[in-house]
Image: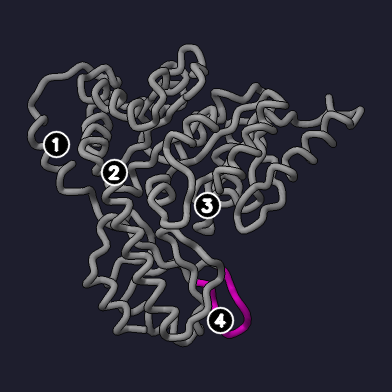
Amino acid sequence: MLPFSCDYMQGAHPKILERFVETNLVPQPGYGEDEYCASAKEKIRAACGCPEAQIFFLNGGTQSNKVVIDSLCRSYEGVICALTGHINAHESGAIEATGRKCLALPQKEGKLEAQTVRKYLTAFYADGTCEHMVFPGMVYISHPTEYGTLYSKAELTALSEVCKEYDIPLFMDGARLGYGLMSRQTDVTLEDVARLCDVFYIGGTKVGALCGEAVVFTKNNMPPHFLTLVKRQGALSAKGRLLGVQFDTLFTDNLYFDISRHAIDMAEKLKEIFAAKGYKFFMDSHTNQQFVVLENEKLEILQKQAYCSIWEPWDEHHTVVRFCTSWATTPQDIEALDALI
C-alpha cells in the first residue's frame, strides 16, 4: 500500500534512530533536565533568532494544544480559533475537557483573518452583558492550516497586532510547521514566527521524529511552574531525553528543514501528476497536503492500493481526498501513484 494518508505513517528519520542507539546507555537526569534537551533548546533558540525563548518538549500535538491553552487561559476564558481549526474540529473535545471553550469564527481557506478577530473582540467588549459570557483569552491558528494553506507575513503581522491591542496571546499550532516554512510560496520564516507569535510549537511527530513537539514561549511568558502544570495534565515524560535526542538531531545540520523541503518537492510532483491528468483540486495548497476531487468509483479502486484520507463530499459522485507527502516519501512512491491514477 502506498503511504499517502498522512505524514506520520512511517517511524522516524534514520539519523534519529542512529542517535538513539549511540546515546542509549548514557545515564542522564529525567524530566527534560538532560544534556540532549539542553543542547536541542540552544539550537532551537538559534534557529528562531530568539535567544530568550523558553522551550519545553511535549509528546504530541493535541497534548501540546491542550497544555498550552489550559496553562495560558484563565478559568473564565476561551480560545478564538477558525471554525475549521484543528482544536475545534479534530481533537475530540480535548480543549473543552479542560473547561476552556473554543470560540470558533468564520474562516477563509482555513485561515483566521485579522479583521474577523477584531470585529469579534470589538463586539464582545461593547456588549454590556459580556461578564455573563466566556471571555476571549487567546487566538489559536495553525500553520499550515487544516487545508494546507499558509499565512503570509502580512496576515500574521495583522493578527499579532490585534492580539497586542487586546492583550491576548497569539498561539500557533506548528504540528506541520516545517512543511509550511519550506513551501515554495511562503514569505514566512521561523524567525518571523518567533517574533510575531507569543507561543508556538515546532512539530516533530509529523516531521521526522517518532514523537514530540517543541513548545516555544517567545516573550519570557512561560507560565510559572510550567513543569508542574504539565505534570498535572499527565504530560510530563520521565525519560525527557527521548524528546531531547530527537530535536537535537533534527536541529543539527539543518536536518529539520532539509527533510521538510523534500516533502514539499514530493508534494509538487504529486500535484503535477494529478494536474496533468485533468483532476480538480479542492483548494490550491502549496504544502505537503494536497486535496484532490476524485470520482467515487475511482476512489474505491485507488483505496485498494494506496492509503489516502477522505476529507469531505464534493457532490453526489465525487469526494475530496487528501494526499499527504512527508519526509519519508520517495520518488518511487510518486511514480507508483502516477501509474494508479
Sooner in the amino-acid sequence: mark 3 or mark 1: 1
Say which element carries label 4.
Answer: strand
Q: Is residue 106 above or below residue 120?
A: below
- Tell me if 34 is positioned left or right of 104 in this view: left
Counting from the top left corner in percent of width and height, residue 299 is at: 44, 81
- First in sequence: mark 4 vs mark 3: 3
Q: Residue at x 24, y 69 (%)?
A: 331
The residue identified by callout 1 is 20
Q: Which residue is drawn at 56% across and 27% down?
A: 70
Point out the frontmost of discs 4 and 2: 2
Q: Callout 3: few (<14), some (14-19), or many (20+) C-alpha neighbours within 10 Å? A: many
> Which residue is drawn at the image coordinates 44% and 23% (left, top)?
230
Work out how far the residue at label 2 is from the one at label 3, CA to CA, in angstroms.
19 Å
Task: Find disc 2 in the rendering and name its residue.
Answer: 256
Magenta stretch, main secondary structure, is strand
Q: In this view, does 3 lie above or below 86?
A: below
Kindly check if marks 2 and 1 are in contact, taking CB atoms under 8 A apart as contact: no
Q: Which of 21 and 275 is in front in this view?
A: 275
User: What x and y, as percent, mark residue 24?
Assistant: 10, 31
Residue extent of the magenta highlight:
312-320
Q: What residue type is labelled 3?
A: Leu
* Circle 4: residue type: His
Residue on which the image places disc 3: 150
Secondary element at tag 3: loop
Residue count near mark 2 (Cα–Cα under 10 Å), binned few <14, some 14–19, many ≥20: many
Give the residue number, with chain letter if any, for mark 4. 318
Left or right, 276 with respect to 168, comes to left
Where is residue 246 drawn, in percent x and y? 24, 36
